[in-house]
């Protein structure tokens, strides 16, 4: 059921099995999965069922670098940022979970195999009709060659799964309204995690409404699913018992803040005289569950290891579906038509190149002295890159461009030599409460439980120790499903 | 002709080869460029305008390549610079150059500048 927190009596208290803060991709998934197993849940959502400006303003941040504005990247109402996502999905690669010696602080506290069953279950949550194997590439248009060979030592064809996109708020609103195990409090802003005197056990979530009501929820377990910025902010704000904030004994809360960063470009590609395409492009136009708009390639683990690269995806828009229509310059046309390749024509695709950012402790969320409408200190976002992040992206693209040029099948253009000048939208917020077995390396353990606190958990992409190149939503949902299982089994 | 005089004309014609060998390009006829070469020249122009120093370096590379391979006309120079093996080797070694954001092998960029200079004569 839904309850507007503004209708509660001031000082209202409730008890439940699990209290979840934030009704976005992680929070809704967790609530639905726990309730399906008979666990009672209180789900706190800062906003209502539709957006409103005063609530949205609670998410305003102090952005240290004006090139990266964060104001428009989050939505603070039921469904969270799934209300404006694009629906592209992909699981992280095997090597994303491993320690990569050339990336400091890399490595997840479990292997990919641990998450695979949850990836399978996450697909229907996001309304993706079927799992997909790259082997399907071989069956698609066998009359066409690959643009980059399947067994190429550096690059792998990349297909994106496509969610409609599922707006979690709309999709699961009725289920949550009717579920006897879920109470969803709207306009309920978590302002502090209350702790016992020893600071090792959470005793409640204190919340407030913009209408001036205060309330608290007591639960056996608490899970913060408010996004990488707000999760860190809430832990840092909760300092009345634990100086410096909960879980921050090693000054790690808010650190290693990451996003995917990218640069636009153009791909000039040969096309067959009959209008046909390469196999990668032909495939996605005919397979349900795959993006109809984007096909691409990724650096593979061997190349990343050899050159010390971070993850990178190079994505081309299918001609005719892109937001702008690029053209092929005459000189590029001449180079592609050089020699025996004169029979082909060329056409241009918009490129979107996305890179993984390595975890750096200096890239962080902290608290300012400026207060929001609830009297809470605002978050300072200090997103920082290192030269290795940028080098990796450039080197990946240059290697890809060289592969196409050597084969005489395509050419690549980068819009900006300086990647950071490309003004990409920093939409994917990750890190800040990263998982690690050792409390000196992460805020949470492999289950997402805050180190040193027996009943406080974090959910969502703030758990990611590293980000890979894949869009995070599928992994967020998979992690939430895994966490639901772990919480159920650990419930007293 | 009448004003120059027969003797003066003969003297001028006798001097012409020396002037040409002295590098006075005004006396050289502009070579005929193919449509593909003219298209390459458009990138050469961008390079000269955006990064003159790099363009000069690339032009020197084209001239040096032409001399060292014995290529003696524009078609031969372009064929040498755009040979698949040469381009592949440069791309493998990371010898790339950006022209208006496009990633080209050094010899390709060099060919662009070379034909641009010829087209401007």
Image (tube, helix red, strand yellow):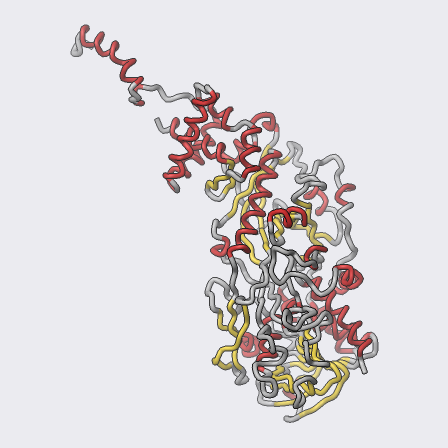
- Along the viewing direction, whichever of B12 and A305 lies nearer the viewer: A305
Q: Is residue A242 above or below residue B61?
A: below
Q: Where is residue A270 in the image (x, y as percent from the top left)?
A: 61, 36
Q: Residue at x 69, y 39 (%)?
A: A149
Seen in the image, is A360 located left or right of residue A458? left
Residue that extends furthest to the top in the rendered view of this protein? B6
- Along the viewing direction, whichever of B105 and A76 lies nearer the viewer: B105
Query: Is any atom of residue A1 visible in this view?
Result: no
Query: Is any atom of residue A272 visible in this view?
Result: yes
Seen in the image, is A457 located left or right of residue B100? right
Give the image quarter of residue A440: bottom right
Q: Which residue is drawn at 47% across and 55% down?
A: A421
- Along the viewing direction, whichever of B95 and A315 lies nearer the viewer: B95
Report the quarter where the N terminus of chain B lies: top left
Q: Residue at x 61, y 31 (%)?
A: A344
Q: Position of residue A210 (x, y in %)?
A: 57, 85
Q: Residue at x 21, y 9 (%)?
A: B11
Q: Is residue A204 above or below residue A84?
A: below
Q: Is residue A191 above or below residue A473?
A: below
Seen in the image, is A203 located left or right of residue B87? right
Give the image quarter of residue A90: bottom right
Q: Where is residue A12 in the image (x, y as percent from the top left)?
A: 68, 92
Q: Is residue A242 above or below residue A462?
A: below
Report the quarter where the C terminus of chain B lies: top left
Q: Where is residue A181 in the image (x, y as percent from the top left)?
A: 79, 80
Give the image quarter of residue A450: bottom right
């Amino acid at each position: 059921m839904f309850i507007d927190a503004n209708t509660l009596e001031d000082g209202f208290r409730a008890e439940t099995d699990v209290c979840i803060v934030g009704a976005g991709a992680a929070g809704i998934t967790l609530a639905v999965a726990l309730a399906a197993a008979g666990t009672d849940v209180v789900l706190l959502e800062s906003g209502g069922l539709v957006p409103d400006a005063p609530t949205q303003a609670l998410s305003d941040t102090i952005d240290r670098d004006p090139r990266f504005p964060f104001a428009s990247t989050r939505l603070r109402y039921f469904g969270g940022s799934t209300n404006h996502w694009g629906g592209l999905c992909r699981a992280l690669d095997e090597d994303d979970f491993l320690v990569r010696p050339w990336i400091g602080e890399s490595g997840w506290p479990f292997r990919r195999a641990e998450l695979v069953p949850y990836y399978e279950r996450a697909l229907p949550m996001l309304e993706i009709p079927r799992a997909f194997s790259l082997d399907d590439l071989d069956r698609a248009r066998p009359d066409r060659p690959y643009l980059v060979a399947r067994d190429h030592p550096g690059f792998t064809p990349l297909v994106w799964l496509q969610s409609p996109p599922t707006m979690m708020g709309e999709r699961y609103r009725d289920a949550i309204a009717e579920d006897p195990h879920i109470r969803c409090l709207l306009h309920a802003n978590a302002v502090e995690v209350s702790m016992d005197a020893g600071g090792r056990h959470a005793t409640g979530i204190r919340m407030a409404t913009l209408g001036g009501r205060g309330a608290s929820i007591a639960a056996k377990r608490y899970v913060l699913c408010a996004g990488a910025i707000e999760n860190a902010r809430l832990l840092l704000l909760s300092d009345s018992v634990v100086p410096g904030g909960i879980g921050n004994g090693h000054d790690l809360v808010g650190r290693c803040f990451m996003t995917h960063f990218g640069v636009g470009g153009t791909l000039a590609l040969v096309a067959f005289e009959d209008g046909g395409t390469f196999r990668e492009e032909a495939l996605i136009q005919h397979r349900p569950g795959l993006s109809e708009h984007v096909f691409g390639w990724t650096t593979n683990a061997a190349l990343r290891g050899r050159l010390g690269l971070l993850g990178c995806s190079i994505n081309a828009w299918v001609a005719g579906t892109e937001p702008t229509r690029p053209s092929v310059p005459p000189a590029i046309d001449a180079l592609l038509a050089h020699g025996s390749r004169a029979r082909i024509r060329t056409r241009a695709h918009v490129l979107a190149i996305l890179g993984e950012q390595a975890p750096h402790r200096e890239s962080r969320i902290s608290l300012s002295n400026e207060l929001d409408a609830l009297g809470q200190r605002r978050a300072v976002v200090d997103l920082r890159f290192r030269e290795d992040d940028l080098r990796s992206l450039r080197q990946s693209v240059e290697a890809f461009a060289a592969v196409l040029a050597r084969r005489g099948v395509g050419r690549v253009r980068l819009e900006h030599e300086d990647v950071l000048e490309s003004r990409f939208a920093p939409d994917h917020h990750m890190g800040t409460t990263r998982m690690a077995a050792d409390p000196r390396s992460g805020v949470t353990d492999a289950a997402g439980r805050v180190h040193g606190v027996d009943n406080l958990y974090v959910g969502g992409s703030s758990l990611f120790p590293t980000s890979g190149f894949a869009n995070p939503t599928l992994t967020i949902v998979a992690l939430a499903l895994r966490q639901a299982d772990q919480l159920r089994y650990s419930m007293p | 002709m009448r004003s120059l005089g027969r003797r003066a004309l003969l003297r001028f014609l006798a001097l012409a080869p020396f002037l040409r060998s002295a590098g006075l390009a005004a006396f050289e006829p502009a070579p005929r460029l193919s449509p593909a070469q003219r298209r390459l020249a458009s990138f050469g122009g961008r390079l000269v305008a955006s990064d003159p120093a790099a363009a000069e370096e690339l032009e020197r590379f084209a001239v040096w390549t032409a001399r060292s391979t014995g290529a003696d006309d524009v078609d031969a120079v372009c064929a040498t610079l755009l040979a698949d093996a040469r381009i592949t080797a440069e791309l493998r070694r990371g010898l790339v150059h950006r022209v208006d954001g496009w990633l080209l092998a050094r010899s390709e960029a060099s060919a662009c500048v070379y034909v641009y200079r010829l087209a401007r004569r």
